[in-house]
Amino acid sequence: MGADRFSTSARLKAIGQEAQARVYRAAAARRPVRRNKLTGRAALLALVLCALVVALAYPMRQYIAQRSDIADQRRAAQQAKARVEQLREQKARWQDPQYVRAQAREHLHFVLPGETGYSVADPTPTGDAAAEHRTTNDAAAHRPWYDNLWDSVDQTDAGGHADAAARR
């Protein structure tokens, strides 16, 4: 009986191992086989897409640059048309004798026979004197009027003394 028991337990153990092996094989069969994610077809497709991107990049850049150039040229043409229109208007004005006469009087100081022409000198100084005049005017604007009056009297008096000294 002892031998039977041992052999029965050994048989049960063997059956359990076989059942366990069948369960593992069934689970392995149901599990998807892990393949490499990058197959040959996918690699070829990626290579073709990269080649297309590289092949189309330069022409697309050129296309965009040319569209920008076309827009710039259209803007320049519109500006040229506007300038031509201004020049046509100016030409039409110069066709009018009254306009020509007014321009000659204004810019060339022409006077008609019998008229008296007057020219007024520009009272604003130039160069260093202009800068000094501006600073003096800025300072004078912030002082009372009687101070400005007295300063002008002093300047005139100092000029008179300089003239008298020069005459001696």
Image (tube, helix red, strand yellow):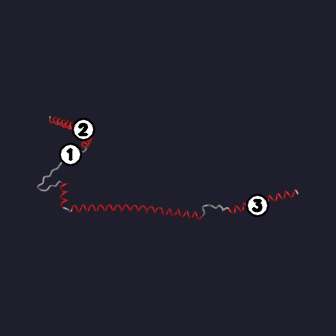
Q: Report the residue at 46% width, 63% height from top.
A: 60
Q: Earlier in the sequence, mark 2 or mark 3?
A: 3
Q: Earlier in the sequence, mark 1 or mark 3?
A: 3
Q: Residue flagged by tag 2: what amino acid is it? A: Pro
Residue lying at the far left in this picture: please name it.
114
Q: Earlier in the sequence, mark 1 or mark 2?
A: 1
Residue lying at the far right in this picture: please name it.
1
Q: For this view, does 16 lie left or right of residue 131? A: right
Q: Residue flagged by tag 1: what amino acid is it? A: Pro
Categorize mark 1 by other alpha carbons within 10 Å: few (<14), some (14-19), many (20+).
few
Q: Residue flagged by tag 3: what amino acid is it? A: Ala
- Residue placed under numbered mark 3 in the picture: 19
Q: Report the residue at 22% width, 39% height from top.
A: 145
- Residue placed under numbered mark 2 in the picture: 144
Picture coordinates of residue 112, whole percent (x, y) = 13, 56
Tell which of 14 and 81 is nearer to you.
14
Q: Which mark is residue 123?
A: 1
